[in-house]
Image (cartoon, rainbow, N blue to C red):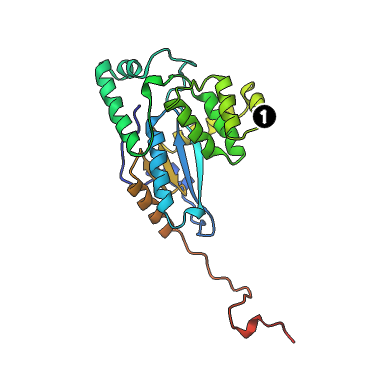
């Protein structure tokens, strides 16, 4: 249930390795502003962060030039398919608190969720492994449906009480977002796309990501945690402002009412 410590809205990558890997000085405003989001579908703050980011994006003047890429991150990679504990008991054992205290903490998260339109139903949550859900997300990304998959998985887990380690459930959710049933069947019956999940998680380790949600803008700026829409909007605006403007082209071009646009005699 925890996310990373809330840093200021925009933070530079601090590790030397990450700085070298992530900064790309050749990016200009001709290219999309790329926002990569490391997330786990079993993370309520990731769901909240998605809503806050979407609210910011809706207000961003250059939103049509933003490409969002969802990245896999497992908060409990060693969890069994079904943990067999409700959310409150699980949190109490994990963080050394009473069940009542866990209920109070969860109630605070639910209240934050309601503020952004998420009707969390923590009583129904089926805690368990999310690895196959991440493989489904990777498949959806192949078909340009990464955001649709992330949204559907969040709702299934936190609102509908779906068990996301259950292949029948994943197949149903995949069909709802328009993925091919045969391809989904093949992927879930194999180890396909496991490497894609692991690569996202390896990148997270290399970049020093310890909690989610984690947003990387053009691999230059980072936002950690479920920040407010205002924070996300400020980050997008700053990142856009600091992108180099493309150099003026010296190639022939037409301008209104210029004789240069007329064909040569």
Residue 243 percent location from the top left of the image = 45, 58
Q: Relative to 149, is 255 above or below?
A: below
Residue 105 percent location from the top left of the image = 27, 26
Residue 128 percent location from the top left of the image = 46, 19
Residue located at (35% from left, 32% from top): 3
Query: For the residue labelled by badge 1, is the local secondary structure a helix, a strand or a loop?
Result: helix
Q: Is residue 34 visible?
A: yes
Q: Nearer the viewer, residue 119 or 131?
A: 119
Q: Quadrant of the C terminus?
A: bottom right
Residue 148 percent location from the top left of the image = 53, 38
According to the picture, the residue beneath numbered tag 1 turns out to be 183
Q: Is residue 242 visible?
A: no
Q: Nearer the viewer, residue 89 or 198?
A: 89
Query: Is residue 178 shown left or right of residue 75?
Result: right
Residue located at (34% from left, 29% from top): 2
Q: Relative to 75, is 49 above or below?
A: below
Residue located at (61% from left, 35% from top): 178
Residue at the far top: name it. 84
* Total number of numbered discs in the rendering: 1
Label 1, residues with CA under 10 Å away: few <14, some 14-19, many ≥20: few
Q: Nearer the viewer, residue 74 or 116?
A: 116
Q: Quadrant of the N terminus?
A: top left
Residue at the far right: name it. 265
Query: Is residue 172 shown left or right of residue 117?
Result: right
**Which quadrant would residue 170 be assigned to in this image?**
top right
């Amino acid at each position: 249930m925890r996310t990373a410590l809330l840093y200021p809205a925009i933070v530079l990558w601090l590790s030397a390795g990450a700085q070298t890997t992530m900064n790309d000085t050749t990016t200009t405003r001709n290219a999309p502003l790329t926002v990569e989001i490391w997330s786990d579908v079993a993370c309520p703050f990731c769901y909240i962060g998605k809503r806050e980011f979407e609210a910011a994006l809706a207000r961003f003047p250059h939103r049509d030039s933003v490409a969002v890429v969802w990245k896999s991150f497992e908060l409990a990679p060693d969890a069994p398919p079904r943990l067999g504990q409700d959310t409150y008991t699980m949190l109490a054992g994990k963080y050394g608190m009473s069940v009542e205290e866990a209920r109070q903490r969860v109630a605070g998260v639910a209240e934050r969720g309601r503020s952004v339109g998420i009707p969390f139903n923590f009583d129904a949550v089926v805690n368990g492994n999310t690895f196959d859900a991440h493989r489904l997300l990777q498949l959806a990304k192949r078909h340009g449906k990464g955001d649709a998959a992330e949204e559907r998985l969040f709702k299934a887990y936190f609102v509908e009480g779906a068990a996301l380690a259950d292949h029948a459930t994943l197949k149903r959710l995949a069909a709802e977002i328009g993925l091919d049933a045969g391809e989904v069947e093949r992927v879930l019956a194999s180890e396909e796309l496991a490497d894609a999940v692991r690569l996202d998680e390896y990148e997270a380790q290399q970049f020093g990501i310890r909690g989610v949600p984690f947003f990387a803008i053009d691999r230059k700026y980072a936002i950690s945690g479920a920040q407010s829409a205002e924070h996300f909007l400020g980050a997008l605006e700053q990142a856009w402002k600091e992108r180099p403007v493309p150099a003026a082209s010296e190639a022939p071009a037409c301008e209104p009412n210029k004789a240069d646009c007329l064909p040569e005699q």
